[in-house]
Amino acid sequence: MSYNTAAAVTGRHTPAPVLAALDIGGTKIAGGLVDTEGALLHQVQLPTPARGTSREMAAAVDGVLDLLARHPLWASVRAVGIGSAGPVDTEAGTVSPVNIPAWRGFPLRSEVAAHPAVGDLPVVLGGDAVAMTAAEHWRGAARPYRNALCMVVSTGVGAGLIIDGRLHTGRSGNAGHLGHISIDFTGRPCPCGSRGCLEGLASGTAIARTAAEAGWQPANGDTSATAVATAARAGDPLALHAFDRAARALAAGIAATATLVEIEAAVIGGGVAQAGDVLFTPLRHHFAAYATLPFAAGTVLVPAQLGTDAGLVGAAALARPALALLPSPTAH
């Protein structure tokens, strides 16, 4: 039910509550206003100054909040949810995104709470992949499943878990951090400090690097993973190799998760998943080779449904439980 319709049906002057959402990644900082049914009503974004100072990053977050606060629906906001690149520490309210060097232990939750437009609103922090997981379980491809892994494969690789029908975040909010498990003991060093991480083999950045190292040269100079996907669809063997290598790494990580916690489905979203069969065909092939135990082999691999809206809808989903803790609005 939409914001305006809800007010008309109830006959009250008190409008339906709205959730504010922030989705903070290495490329952009997005903000949105989401209703309690998961519909994205309004969104804005600014580029992420990922190589800037801590204060430049904080100023960008404030800028997105400034833009959101100008919208008439801001008056109906009752809670703020944040999905941030991680790792995060939901107990301390801090973030240390691998791809944002200036933020190490940055107190993001308190910084957002200090924004003048936020005031006394509850502020809930989670990892961006956990937010995507919450979104896909609330409104997307994970809805039919009680146990699922949801992955974002984009600039990095993140994931979250649904266990027994509930979002499983772990003590610090990082459960399911699949992008930083080591699957190649002698592999590339990772910015996280480890080596051979899944992210370093399967992210969009890794796909582009693998293709370039194999000698792939795009005709138009575009060396992005999207360009590699286009070349792979056209049958370019070097581009196909880059996606096959990424798919094999993803399959190993998903199979390990399926073996460990017996998931029913793995939902794959993010920009790399937009490659479609170029990714999913080799992914299913390699998964069958790794998930050999019967209970793991039955895991289905499906694309995410919410696309680019997942981050904001998911951040709102993280904040939605806070609505139950607020005093009931008084009708006028």
Image: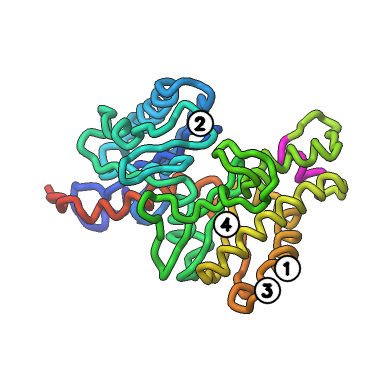
Answer with the quarter of the image where residue 62 lies.
Answer: top left
Q: Earlier in the sequence, mark 4 or mark 1?
A: 1
Assess disc 1: are there few (<14), some (14-19) or many (≥20) residues with their C-alpha within 10 Å of its C-alpha. few
- Kindly indicate whether the residue at mark 2 contacts the one at mark 1 (C-beta within 8 angstroms): no
Answer with the quarter of the image where residue 230 lies.
Answer: top right
Which residue is tagged 4? 304
Which residue is tagged 3? 292
Question: What residue type is disc 3 on?
Answer: Thr
The residue nearer to you, when weighing 295 against 145, is 295
| Residue at left offset 59%, top offset 77% | 295
Q: Residue furthest front?
A: 186
Q: Nearer the viewer, mark 4 or mark 1?
A: 1
Queried whether the magenta region covers residue 97, the answer comes back as no
Q: Nearer the viewer, mark 2 or mark 4?
A: 2
Assess disc 3: are there few (<14), some (14-19) or many (≥20) residues with their C-alpha within 10 Å of its C-alpha. few
Magenta-drawn segment = 224-232
Which residue is tagged 1? 289
Label 2 to label 4, Cα distance in Å?
A: 26 Å
- Kindly indicate whether the residue at mark 4 contacts the one at mark 2 (C-beta within 8 angstroms): no
Label 3 to label 1, Cα distance in Å?
A: 6 Å
Provide residue 200's location: percent of width, then percent of height. Answer: 65, 43
Queried whether the magenta region covers residue 226, the answer comes back as yes
Helix, strand or loop for disc 3: loop
Q: Nearer the viewer, mark 3 or mark 2?
A: 3
Q: Nearer the viewer, mark 3 or mark 4?
A: 3
Question: What residue type is disc 2 on?
Answer: Ile
| Residue at left offset 65%, top offset 53% | 183
Which numbered marker is on residue 100? 2
Q: Earlier in the sequence, mark 1 or mark 2?
A: 2
From the viewer's perspective, tell me whether residue 268 is left or right of residue 213.
left
The residue nearer to you, when weighing 231 against 100, is 100
Q: Earlier in the sequence, mark 3 or mark 4?
A: 3
